[in-house]
Image (cartoon, grey):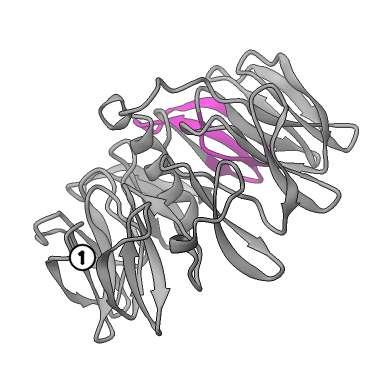
Amino acid sequence: MARTLAISLCLTALALTPASAAGPPERPALFVIAQGGKYGYIDRTGKIVIAPQFEQAINFYGLSGLAAVAVGGKWGMIDRTGKFVLQPAYEDSPDFSSEGLASVMIHGRYACIDRTGAQPPKLQFESRCNFSEGLSAVYLGGKHGFVDPKGTTVIPALYEEVESFSEGLAAVKLGGKWGFIDKEGRMMIKPQFDATWAFCEGLAPVRVGPQWGAIDKAGKTILALKYANAIQFIDGRGQIAVDGKQGFIDPTGRMVIAPQFTDTRVFSQGLAAVKIGEKYGYIDTNGKVVIEPQFDLAVPFFDGLGFVEVDQKKGYIDRTGRYVWPPTK
């Protein structure tokens, strides 16, 4: 139930909704495949679009139309034809936001670059530029604030820690406690929590002491503070752990899929990977097993395909469990 994966899936889902896509229409994803120790890309039908040739690679997704790949120990960016848009020169993988900006590491320091590789002078800070919903957190003089894509300070650096904006609000830490601000810097939910996650589907996990619950955007408690783990709702289902087993509840706290699995992943596109015995399969939002447990690893579906591993080989399946790309290394 990793925080990074859950939040990433929530932000990705939000980015792909028609209402949020003010730019060009979303293109179908391209998926990384391994063949002969090299990485390339297939489309969702399993057709090779970019031949395996890279040391490392990350999926195409979002509106940037670019993907990060590694050659000679350095990272660059390619377009959907496999042509380098940014030559391999970076120490970590760039990830362009919808604002056309990405954070990279050059000679051990962070830099913010545009799609040409130029470094806008007003966007060079001590921390990563990580734009979400038009704003990026920055670290200035020992405190955190937010800037816009032009480098203009929108929210002054006042906070001990901050998280990215999601659904119009960002978690901020002030006086040792977490609360939420809006894009104008107004404190919408006063700092009172020991830990928080981002808002997703209108709810944010919060913790006071050892116990987790969830609040809405008005700060109202929707799930009582009584859970042992953070619960992020995606597709109307949130993971829960009881006596060493995992299941799912709905946003009212009603148990909809009883704790019975040794491991679970968040729901995505109506399916969730679950571990039954020693293998992973997939269930629907009612808890029915729709793809039998047979994988050593399975992750949430994205753009119609699920990534799976068998005997350390990696492949993709469709929603029926049919291999679109059989496991390879």
Residue pointed to by mark 1: 180
Q: In the drawing, does residue 198 fall left or right of residue 298?
A: left
Q: Residue at x 43, y 34 (%)?
A: 268
Residue 221's place in the image compared with 5, above or below, is: below
Q: Is residue 207 visible?
A: no
Quadrant of the image for the C terminus?
Answer: top right
Quarter occupied by residue 309: top right
Look at the image and say whether residue 215 sits in the magenta stretch.
no
* Three-letter code for the amino acid on which mark 1 is drawn: Phe
Residue 303 visible in this rendered orientation of the protein: yes
Residue 172, horizontal then vertical, whole percent: 28, 71
Q: Quadrant of residue 231?
A: bottom left
Quarter of the figure with residue 277: top right
- The part of the chain drawn in magenta is 274-302
- For image coordinates 69% across by 71% down, the residue present is 108
Q: Position of residue 13 (x, y in %)?
A: 38, 36
Relative to 75, residue 121 above or below: below
Q: Nearer the viewer, residue 127 or 8?
A: 127
Q: Is residue 295 magenta-colored?
A: yes
